[in-house]
Amino acid sequence: MIVALASLELAALLPRFKHAAASAGFILALAAPLAVVTAGCGWLLSLGGGYDAQLLEWHKWLGTATAAGSVLTAILFWRGKFSAYRISLFATAGVLMAAGHLGGSLTHGSDYLTQYAPAPLKKLLGIQTAKQNLTSRSLAELQQQPVFAGVIEPLFENKCVHCHGAEKSKAGLRLDSFAALQDGSDDGPVLKAGDAAQSPLIQRLLMPTDSDDHMPPAGKPQLSTGEITLLKWWVNAGAPATNALGQLAAPPEVLAALPVR
Ligand code: HEC
């Protein structure tokens, strides 16, 4: 509603559409209270945890600013301060878009906007196919480390251990160490070494996002396509505990998905 109203106000600058924003009062009467309710719901949701802390911090404050801006915009309008109202409206619309983008990054992963973009466009935007926030290691450094400790464990740590760790272990499954992973869940093993397709852990990742069984659950930070490629490859390679990357012949798509500089 805020973006629509900003568009209407822009259109109203043209003589042909000068009445475009005639319903501004009505739109604001809906938008301002709803913005406050929305920010409140977001705040409550954030208490559930499991989100990237830095993204969440920004999203929280920009979301709060959006709500405050919407209320201010409405007040200025009702007070008849029309130029201040327009400035406030456009500023709020801008903050709203930034907050919305961060909200998308929180729930769908930070590469959600460009994940399925055509390769040439990605190249143009300077996006690597496997963008990860883990590290600034070089490939040579990573080759020396055990794949589990260097790649797989940090990935679980980032996206799974929040629910499958020492504090919470949903379904009796812990993913915070190699031994815990081998112990599986209340229902038994989650890994079949050498066979990703038959491993519940991998199957869960590949289920449609709207399925109740999909992992991580809907609304939580998701794995990138590169991260799924890595996990699948590691399981198919026998899910080894200590083998270094250099000892396992990793195909090019796996090397491309590694979290390296
Ligand atoms: C927000 C909390 C949450 C996060 C994050 C999460 N899970 Fe889960 N996971 C659950 C819950 C709850 C269940 C049990 C319900 C179910 O079976 O769907 C579960 C069940 C599972 C199971 C099935 C265990 C069994 O045998 O029944 C696997 C495998 C699994 N998760 C893997 C993962 C992986 C891998 C990740 C990270 C990529 C992950 N989960 C992230 C909450 C979470």
Image: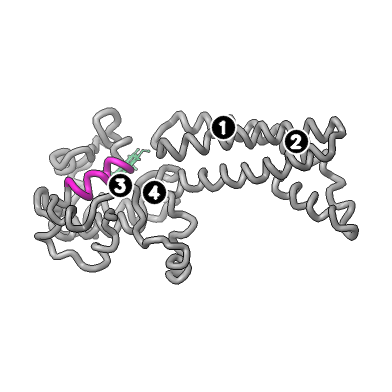
**Front position in the image: 95 or 158:** 95
Q: Left or right: where does residue 225 sit relative to residue 219?
A: left
- Circle 2 packing at 10 Å, graded few (<14), some (14-19), many (20+), is many
Mark 4, other Cα within 10 Å: few <14 / some 14–19 / many ≥20:
many
Tell me, for residue 41, which label it has, or none.
1
Q: Quadrant of the N terminus?
A: top right
Looking at the image, is mark 3 or mark 4 earlier in the sequence? 3
Identify the disc placed on residue 166. none
* Magenta-tinted stretch: 149-159
Report how far apart the C-alphas of labels 3 and 4 lie in the structure.
Answer: 15 Å
**Residue placed under numbered mark 4 in the picture:** 222
Q: Is residue 235 left or right of residue 2?
A: left
In this view, the mark in front (3 or 1) = 3
Mark 4 or 1, nearer chain start: 1
Separation of marks 4 and 1 at Cα, in angstroms: 21 Å
Quadrant of the rendered image containing residue 49: top left
Q: Position of residue 41 (x, y in %)?
A: 56, 32
Asked if the residues shown at circle 4 and circle 1 are in contact, with their CB atoms under 8 angstroms apart, the answer is no
Query: Residue type at mark 3?
Result: Leu
Precedes in sequence: disc 3 or disc 2? 2
Q: CA distance from mark 3 to mark 2?
A: 41 Å
Q: Main secondary structure of the magenta part?
A: helix
The residue where tag 2 is placed is 73
User: Cα distance, mark 4 to mark 2?
Assistant: 35 Å
Q: Residue at x 24, y 30 (%)?
A: 166
Frontmost of labels 4 and 2 is: 2
Instruction: Say which residue appears at 71% left-offset and 45% top-offset.
Output: 90
Can residue 155 be found in the magenta stretch?
yes
